[in-house]
Image (tube, rainbow, N blue to C red):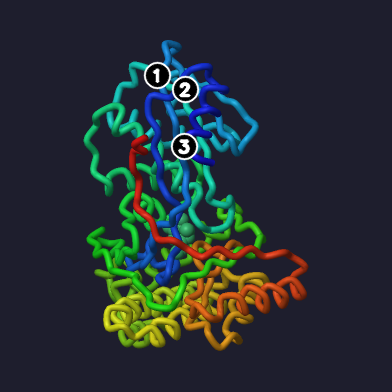
Amino acid sequence: MTVKELKAAYAEAYGKQPEAIYFSPGRVNLIGEHTDYNGGFVFPCALSFGTYLLLSKNNEKKMNFRSLNQPEVTSITLDKLTERLDKSWVNYPLGVMAQYVKRGVDFKDGYDILIWGNVPNGAGLSSSAALEVVTAYALNDQLGTGYDRTELAKIGQKAEHEFALVNCGIMDQFASAHGKANRAIFLNCDTLSFELVPVELEGVKVLISNTHSPHKLDSGAYNDRVAQCQLAVKQLQTVKPELKNLAELTEEEFNKIQSAITDPVANKRARHVVGEVQRTVDAVEALKAGDLEKFGKLMNASHVSLRDDYEVTGLQLDTMAEEAWKIPGVIGSRMTGGGFGGCTVSLVKDESIDQFIKEVGAAYKAKTGLDPEFYIAEIGDGAKKVEE
Ligand code: GLA
């Protein structure tokens, strides 16, 4: 939808013009998966698609929520902004408002809000982070709270923890808040220091393959992984009491002390995390040195580790990645995001894109019975006010 069409939809919904329009993007992670909540590195980039939020003040002391993607219309009075709803998409923007209230912000006015997003839902491309961050950004602008982008990301992450009940790391909200066109974000999730690294690939595209098998982060499998990593840290502390995060360990150190993790599942999870942090550091170095072949090999190794040790892939993601590896012009391919369905990300030479879509698409459909979808990723900017 164009901005003009969005404004027309707003006028139809609320019988007036919006006072302001905001946008925040989804993200694709190139490498560094399930490392963020372990204090490790990630390397995501913001996408050109995302979520729009249109608003204007009302005199009703209520937040009115509508979305062009959802049928439900919800009104919440200003004294109820910290109360989670039982089951509703509104929990994402509401969860962000609750964080503002918790920080002492006193909402004097209500807003009439309309949302529209073009990040495919449940595809592992952070439609929820886009919605959280666009809300956090809009409120910051409207209320003059002066939070910086990192703070907005933290507000979005807290909303996810408390209102969506997913104990996620900071990667998605950070990428949505801090993204820059043609750059990936090399983020240290422990210190939140980051570097924007150019992703200008000559003759190569970042291709996203949607398995159309929705991921279900709230199913508990994600929170289980977080808990298994915490267990691994706890068991490792018996031999290394000062350890706080798995990401502090080199592979060499890990191999020396890993037998302290007596729980076999937690042991495998920890091995993935330690290896993935190293792969992310190596991949960024390879990209800076122009060594795409190495970057691609590290992507493939990341997928294998997520498949065998972290066990977050499954038939659909494995088929998509493994079929991609068979195409000669594919530099690397792996699952991206939380896993359990969703998307893969691949680096593909221009001349092989058509072959990829045709052959990987056909093999995937034959094995899974599902129709996949492919997008060439455009790396876009982070949260912003849309100037008309
Ligand atoms: C989801 C979470 C992120 C991150 C990824 C896995 O997208 O929201 O915080 O943990 O999974 O890397």
- Could you say which is closer to the camera, residue 64 or residue 227? 64
**SS for dot 3:** helix
Which residue appears at 37% of the width and 87% of the height?
Answer: 255
Q: Amino acid at mark 3?
A: Val
Q: Are marks 2 and 1 in contact (CB under 8 Å)?
A: yes
Question: Which residue position is annotated with label 2?
Answer: 112
Q: CA distance from mark 3 to mark 2?
A: 17 Å
Q: CA distance from mark 3 to mark 1?
A: 19 Å
Q: Which mark is residue 57?
A: 1
Residue 107 vs 350, above or below: the answer is: above
Disc count in the image? 3
Q: Can you tell which of label 3 and label 2 is closer to the viewer?
A: 3
Which residue appears at 52% of the width and 43% of the height?
Answer: 117
Tell me, yes or no, if residue 69 can be seen here.
yes
**SS for dot 1:** strand
Which residue appears at 38% of the width and 75% of the height?
Answer: 201
Q: Residues within 10 Å of mark 2 (few under 14, many from 20)?
A: many
Question: Which residue position is annotated with label 3?
Answer: 3
Residue 208 vs 163, above or below: the answer is: below
Which quarter of the rendering shows the C terminus?
Answer: top left
Among numbered discs 3 and 1, the one appearing first in the sequence: 3
- Could you say which is closer to the camera, residue 46 or residue 354? 354
Q: CA distance from mark 2 to mark 1?
A: 6 Å
